[in-house]
Amino acid sequence: MIRPSEFFTFCKITILNTGNSLYISFFGIAHFNLTHMKKITFFYLMMVSFFTVGAQTTIPHKAAQINAALLAASTPLRSGASVYGYNESGEWVELQKGTNELVCIADDPESKGFSVACYHKDLEPFMERGRVLKAEKKSHQEIFDIREEEVKSGTLPMPSTATSMTIYYTNDEANFDAVTGEVKHGNFRYVVYIPFATAASTGLPTSPEVPGMPWIMDPGTHRAHIMNTPPAND
């Protein structure tokens, strides 16, 4: 796909502005002579058109999204996991109907890098609420505050026991093959949600002292969770 910044070079556009007329040559073949009244409108339409094309996001095929999402799941659970991702229009849809306790989500094509995750189905209300609020353009802090209030009021259920999530990611998008769903040099991050747990109740520090050390993040809140991030491969 041609980037907007590369368009003029690729098309070999020649522009000559002489007073009230604007002469434009595409590839040295197609020529346009625009009057002063028309040239601003022409440029506006041209730039909107090509910047729109450049902003389009390619959605990987359904099978590729499923294959990639399931990389975050343990092998025995992959065939029965529910998988959610995106259709050709970029809408959030179910890609694979599940039969076990695991929910997996595909990579967000609008986000930098590559990241998929699988988590216990009891976390789905919490995760879905976050997706809804994100779609409403809420900030990270706003999402946190809204869910904190809703969990405390009982309108947003959270698991009553420790519940896990696994993230598989790479910071380099070039490591992800959108055709096959294969990922090179991927890394794991492990999360165990324990709502309102603290350092005192778990015996864990609030920051890691060495790479891969478990620690508790957001202690004392609805989003309290144990983090374990092994050293990265990329």
Image (tube, rainbow, N blue to C red):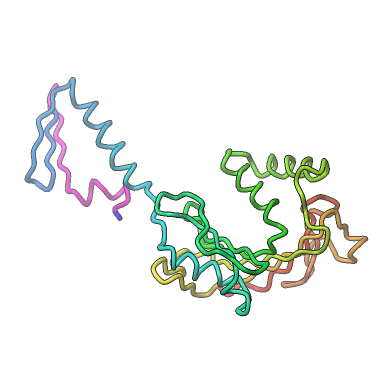
Q: Position of residue 63 (x, y in %)?
A: 44, 67
Q: Which residues are magenta?
A: 2-21
Q: Residue furthest front?
A: 99
Q: Residue at x 74, y 41 (%)?
A: 145
Q: Residue at x 66, y 44 (%)?
A: 140
Quarter assignment of residue 165: bottom right
Indicate the quadrant containing the C terminus: top left, top right, bottom left or bottom right: bottom right
Q: Is residue 190 above or below residue 149?
A: below
Q: Residue furthest bottom?
A: 76
Indicate the quadrant containing the N terminus: top left, top right, bottom left or bottom right: bottom left
Q: Is residue 230 above or below residue 91?
A: below
Q: Position of residue 147 (x, y in %)?
A: 73, 44
Q: Position of residue 12 (x, y in %)?
A: 17, 48
Q: Is residue 155 above or below residue 103?
A: above
In the rendered image, residue 15 lying in the magenta stretch gets the answer yes
165 left or right of 36?
right
Q: Residue at x 88, y 57 (%)?
A: 198
In the rendered image, residue 48 lying in the magenta stretch gets the answer no
